[in-house]
Image (cartoon, helix red, strand yellow):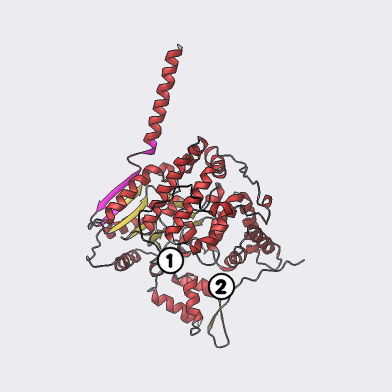
Amino acid sequence: MPLKAKIMSQQLARQKSTSASKAAENDAEDVLFNSNYGLRSIELNRPSKLNALNGSMISKITPRLLEWAKSDMANVIVMKGAGPKAFCAGGDVATLALWNKNGQQQKSIDYFSKEYQLDHLIATYQKPYIAFMDGITMGGGVGLSVHAPIRIATERTVFAMPETTIGFFPDVGASFFLPRMAGEAGTYLALTSERLSGVNVFYTGLATHYLHSSSLPQLESRLAELRFKDYDDMPSRLAVINATIEEYCTGLPYDEPMFLAGEIRNAIDRCFRHDTVHEILAALEAEQAQKQQDPQVQAWAKHTIDVLHQRSPTSVHVALRQMRLGPKWSISETFKREHQIAAKFMKGQEFTRGVTSKLIDRSKGPVQWEPRTLEDILPEENISEDFFKVDEKLPKLELLSRTDYVEYPYSREFGLPTEKDVMEKVSLGLSTPDEVLQHFLEEKRNKQGVLEVVSEILARKVAEDKQGTAVWVDHLEQPTTTA
């Protein structure tokens, strides 16, 4: 081929590649919007990619939510995913890693700006917003769902914040919702990237309701028929929606035990309450070495040690520091601080290294992290400190809503009773354990899951005094290694 023709052919190929790339980033069908009476639905429509969230999808969803917020015709918003496998498996991190490798870190930072703006808008939205967490719900998908006042898990739900597996940190507001989980469950999920499936997403409070996936289409049609008066406030509207959802509950699976429960849950609180990774590892080793320990707890401790050593050492340290600072942050400050942390990860190498190995090259061997192992980081080193310093040179995240809060506004009304709720009731010193359970069953109108969750909390955290009155206890004493 003549040189001129060869050059023209290469130029044409580059043009086609660029056009294809732009088309992929701005697919007109990657999000579907639908109006049905008073219901407005958003359907993430990339089922072949497990509905992974990209910039094109965010650029469509955000203005539509802003538009519906002003509309008198939009009563209820439903966020869902296309196909049976996933609600949303996360952000399109492979694209971000490729941008970083090509020196386009600012494009990655801009992506997080748009994503966090959307997540904060959802967290502060002033109309009923319902997330169908049907299928894989991870990372970016959690940001689209966990901040909603109504969150529905199904038998197909698989929840995780998997960021420590790819050299990142639990973002999309994880600094807010994970530390506010009972005990150290959130810290455990943040550092290990452990998965929760099906009804366990409901038991932990990450979902407010549990339905079979086959009920969702009927529920959506019923929600479209709801009518509200102009003077109905947000709590009143959500109460009607909550009652409507409860009509479709068909019971909990009998063959799926509660995961974060019993002695394993006590061990999680003992081990992950520490403020350094080295102390957490030492606590796990003590659990494993204790010969009088429950064999299931010993096996869990060994597994958890192995898992932590597979994660990015930098990410594990950052995630732990994040879990300790997060309870002090409001929802707005959370996203502003996470934006700074994300920008620093984009400018570094750990995220790009992890995503390239895990998701692009799909290497079967361990990722070559830097530092390589948790043991390579000395106890006196504070490698996470720089991630939490506010860098004035980085652009500030401009949020789309002025609403702010330090606790989720509706978490107690529509979800299951929490450990904190039970502790407050017990601390009054006026009830037997059976009376405490009956109180919550009546308060929640026999909502499914109340019996199971409150009974587990009572069995694990409550004893009876000589008068039969419920007394709160803890199980934070560390087991002693025996020879």
Image position of 10 with respect to 123: above or below: above
Q: Which residue is mark 2?
A: 460
Image marks 2 and 1: residues in contact by CB distance under 8 Å: no
Name the residue type under label 2: Arg
Drawn side of residue 480 relative to residue 360, left or right: right
Which residue is rendered at x = 64% and y = 51% of the image? 309
**Would you name the residue on which mark 1 appears?**
407
Q: Is residue 413 left or right of residue 317?
A: left
Quarter of the figure with the C terminus: bottom right
Instruction: Using the rendered view, name the quadrant where residue 125 is placed.
Output: bottom left
Q: Position of residue 105 (x, y in %)?
A: 48, 40
Of residue 253 and residue 286, the one placed in the foreground of this image is 286
Q: Is residue 1 visible?
A: no
Q: Residue at x 50, y 39 (%)?
A: 100
For label 2, the crowd category at 10 Å Cα-Cα, with few meaning under 14, some 14 to 19 and many 20 or more, is: some
Report x, y in % for residue 72. Answer: 22, 58
State which region is magenta: 24-40
Is residue 193 magenta-colored? no
Circle 2 or circle 1, nearest the eye: 1
312 to the left or right of 430? right
Q: Nearer the viewer, residue 161 or 66?
A: 66
> Quadrant of residue 482 in the image?
bottom right
Give the farthest residue toward the top. 2
Q: Tag 2, which secondary structure? A: helix
Name which quarter of the figure residue 472 lies in: bottom right
Relative to 390, is 29 on the left or the right? left
Is disc 1 placed on a helix, strand or loop? loop
